[in-house]
Amino acid sequence: MTPGDEEHLRREAAAWFARMRGPGADAARAEFDAWRAGPGRQDAYDRLVQRFEESAILGHSRLSDLRLRTSADRRGPPPAVWWTALAAGLVLGAIAISQAPWAPSAGAQPQARYVSAPGQIRTIVLARDLTVVLDTDTVLAASTRGDRPHLVLERGRVRVESGRPLEIEADGAQVVAERAAFDLRRQGDKGDKGDKSVEVSILRGEVQAQVGGLLQRGRTRIDAGQCLILTSGRKSAPMPAPSRDRQWPTGLLIFDDTPLTQVLAEADRYGGRKIRLADTGLGRLQVSGGLKVTDPDGLARALAAALGLNVETGPGGDLVLSRSAA
């Protein structure tokens, strides 16, 4: 492939990157699938998406005006022309993506077990139309039940994007989905106080969830934009899904008047260098905006700039936020 061909392919990928984030994404999906089936196109598109995820940077001003330049604000998604300009300027990067072609088999014994290490966000391509993103410290088992994928979330959180019917279980809760994108999260697995719970949030399509066997009645339908919490055999009513976690596969979380201590607790889940507070009173400071919690150095610098604090390196290598000298 000549340099000119590579540049043309990159521009095509950038155009699709913008189009699939616009209001007509669902209508364009079949055309997009046909385009990316061509030689080298899926790789070019994946590299562009990877670079976008890695290059998300904080745009901040003073205090609560902290904002992420590469995320949607509360008024809705940015226009397609904005996405196109962003995509066209990206330099190709890399991220670890595992591919595991799906092969149906009899029974429901696990064919594979996927693990993400603390601090790692891992993407698993189980099939052309089935992708799973594992959040930090997550364990997922994959098998088949007949010709249908059967997944078991043993720990952590996953984002599932499927163009086929599938089943997924987590701590006694079962979810049945067909052509949907959703998050499934187990909580309370590590001795946390309170009941264990499972939360399912729908990004696209619809799913049905219940506690108990998949053949039992009483499934609850959850539509796009809704979430459901299942705790100790009980189900909540479907409710609006929180928007703050929508971009978690990129390491980005959205905070709205959130105490600084809670922001740092989220960052601690991803390991790496810890961010400490020189004064516990700083933990009450409120943070609003988008933050990349998987980058402790960048996070500490952004918080210090936004909140008028200093950031230093402690004796043990931790990052320490302190009040600026008068």
Image (cartoon, rainbow, N blue to C red):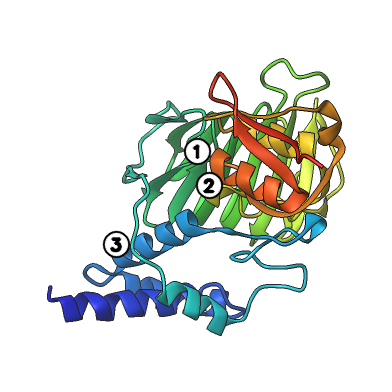
Question: Which of the two discs, 1 and 3, labels the residue nearer the N terminus?
Answer: 3
Q: Is residue 16 above or below residue 277?
A: below
Quadrant showing the N terminus:
bottom left
Residue position for label 1: 150
The answer to whether the residue labelled 3 contacts the one labelled 2, judged by CB atoms less than 8 Å apart, is: no
Number of other residues with Cα within 10 Å of mark 1, as a class: few under 14, some 14 to 19, many 20 or more = many
What residue is drawn where x is 37% and y is 61%?
Answer: 46
Residue 166 is labelled as: 2
Residue 47 is labelled as: none
Give coordinates of residue 25: x percent, y percent: 55, 75
Three-letter residue code for mark 2: Leu
Q: Is residue 32 above or below residue 56?
A: below
Three-letter residue code for mark 1: His
Three-letter residue code for mark 3: Asp
Front-lying residue, 63 or 178: 63
What residue is drawn where x is 38% and y is 30%?
Answer: 112
The answer to whether the residue labelled 1 contacts the one labelled 2, judged by CB atoms less than 8 Å apart, is: yes
| SS assignment at label 1 | strand
Image quarter of residue 283: top right
Q: Is 255 situated left or right of 59 in this image?
A: right
Give coordinates of residue 231: x percent, y percent: 80, 30
Residue position for label 3: 43
Q: Is 144 situated left or right of 179 in this image?
A: left
| SS assignment at label 3 | helix
Question: Which of the two discs, 3 and 2, labels the residue nearer the N terminus?
Answer: 3
Number of other residues with Cα within 10 Å of mark 2, as a class: few under 14, some 14 to 19, many 20 or more = many
